[in-house]
Image (tube, rainbow, N blue to C red):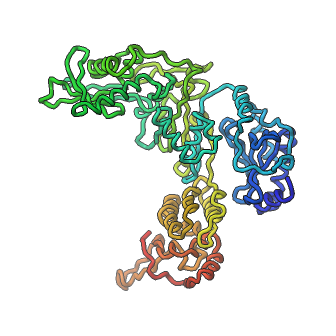
Amino acid sequence: MNHDARVLFEDRIQDEEDRTWAWRALETIRHHFPESDHWTTGGVDKNYIDIRIGAKRLQNAKGIPAMFLSVDQNRPCLRLNARYAGGESRLIRAGTATIDTFEAWLATATSLLADNQRLMKGEGLNPSDFEPEFTDGDDAPSTAESGAVNSLAADREPGPTNLILFGPPGTGKTYHTVNEALRILDPALLSNSLSRGELTAAFDKYIENGQIVFATFHQSFSYEDFVEGLRATTENGQIEYVVEPGVFKRLCDRAIQGVPASDDPFDKALAAFREKLEVATNGELLMPTSTGKQFTVRYDGGRTFRITPQSSQDTGTKYTGNMDLVRQLYRTGDETGIYYLSYVRGMLSYLKKECGLPASAPAPTVAAGRKEFVIVIDEINRGNVSRVFGELITLIEPTRRAGAREALSVTLPYSKTSFSVPGNLHIIGTMNTADRSLANLDIALRRRFSFVEMPPRPTLLEGITVDGIDIARLLTVMNERIEVLLGRDHAIGHSYFMPLRERRELPLLRYIFRNKVVPLLQEYFFEDWERIQWVLNDHRKDNGFRFVIRPSLDIARLFGSQANISPDDNHWKLNEKAFEIAASYAGIIDSEVARAVTATAGEPAADRDGDTDGAAGAA
């Protein structure tokens, strides 16, 4: 690394011991992996430098990193490239680890990268060996290197992804599920420098095509919603309970077939059926049951269709049919558990005769030719995970998937059918650590998933200032205080402040704090307003710059002079005027900075000891 690059890297690290830690860590990695290549991204003109460790040829613009050495919150940290380390990033940070514990981390890293050892076998190149020395942005395999990535993948057994992105609110967990899903379904998209809008459009297309299913867990979400359950229906005046597949089982059934909706003959027939309905009288089609009785059907898409028997037109009797059961009858021929069987048979016959559905269902695609499928589970820890997954806890394990050497299947409790999870179905979940700590998550679930931490990234806010307020520093300082008071699981994510990249205006910062940050702190601290004051540094500000203030109460006026009442110590209110003043936000970083900002802006100084006139908004 040349002199300018070294100076820039060290300037971002405040503590001299941390600088020593970073260089000793690099020396230890070089000693452990003498053939690894080291290169940098960023540059002097971009005001940042990160160091990559992996394999990079001199003639290629980009390399394939196995490790990253970067500076976050003024401290160097090392992490693994989760893509090549079994989904684990294993972050280690100066100040929390000595060189001795770093050796233990390196041993773990070596084990996690065992299947991708070629990534650490380059030519032993250093940053100064490359021309230019810096590359732009994150590294991704170039066209010339794609063969190397493919050969690495060929060296290990292909397996399904069970991944959970975890972190505090606002750190981009749901945002990154788009990238993770596309990495599985179409990795070339991520190496083509597409915009976020283009990636989202591709994600939506896969949802429409049935290769991605998005679900959100909540406290009422159950096994019956996820796998299968009973649904009450009536036929001939009698109540019957029928088995309905859940969102996960339906996706498993599609994954076993291995074809997306655009290639599925049944889905094609349904599209033709809907086209007929669009031009039909009253949006209904007439067809016979298997016994020759006439009935009309109304279908708006989705899983159900409305049935009106011709014999009951006058009485208005209607039934609800399930299109999943029509699909089941077509694929398996099994009539077990099918309600309104004669209507289901009639619907299937119509699809075959009028909508181009082949007479027989095609055999499932062989494993090698199946498409990949992804279920994204947002807020996975908000549901009762053990109850929702049930026996899937065992079946989702990669070695227990259908077709694996140690494959398992179970008999489902409602349908009594054999069930297994196919290997081409991938699970991506997100987990909000403010709701529930990773340590408290079901240990059986933890063992079957890889976890990638998504911490706040103030570096994404670097260079953003609003009326002289350094937003990256503002977020960093608040999170440092929260970590002391509550722990790192309750930090504030960078995404709350990302709109400031486009509009660097005080009214927008006010909106973010008043409607996002302060309510989040209220939730974190259970209305402990004194601690909220500590996070916002209010206890060290002049009173006019405090977001949270303790109002004075005239007990004698309220209750009379003879009432011996002590005011409630927990009586606080929000100072709405403070949200309008730039110095209030600058004071979060440092109370002296607030006075400097005030002087620069020409704002009147606030009385340190007096209350603020006009403060409103009971907290």
Q: Whole-percent x and y of residue 145?
A: 74, 35
Quadrant location, the C terminus: bottom left
Q: Whole-percent x and y of residue 230?
A: 35, 28
Instruction: Establish if 548 lies above or below 419.
Output: below
Q: Residue at x 70, y 41 (%)?
A: 140
Q: Does residue 511 appear in this view? A: yes
Q: Residue at x 62, y 78 (%)?
A: 597
Q: How many marks?
A: 0
Q: Whole-percent x and y of residue 190?
A: 62, 41
Q: Whole-percent x and y of residue 68?
A: 74, 46
Left or right, 171 with reference to 261: right
Pick the front one: 450 or 329: 329
Q: Residue at x 13, y 30 (%)?
A: 315
Q: Residue at x 66, y 64 (%)?
A: 463
Left or right, 468 with reference to 8: left
Pick the front one: 515 or 288: 288
Instruction: Establish if 558 lies above or below 176.
Output: below
Left or right, 412 with reference to 352: right
Instruction: Establish if 313 lies above or below 465.
Output: above
Q: Does residue 76 appear in this view? A: no
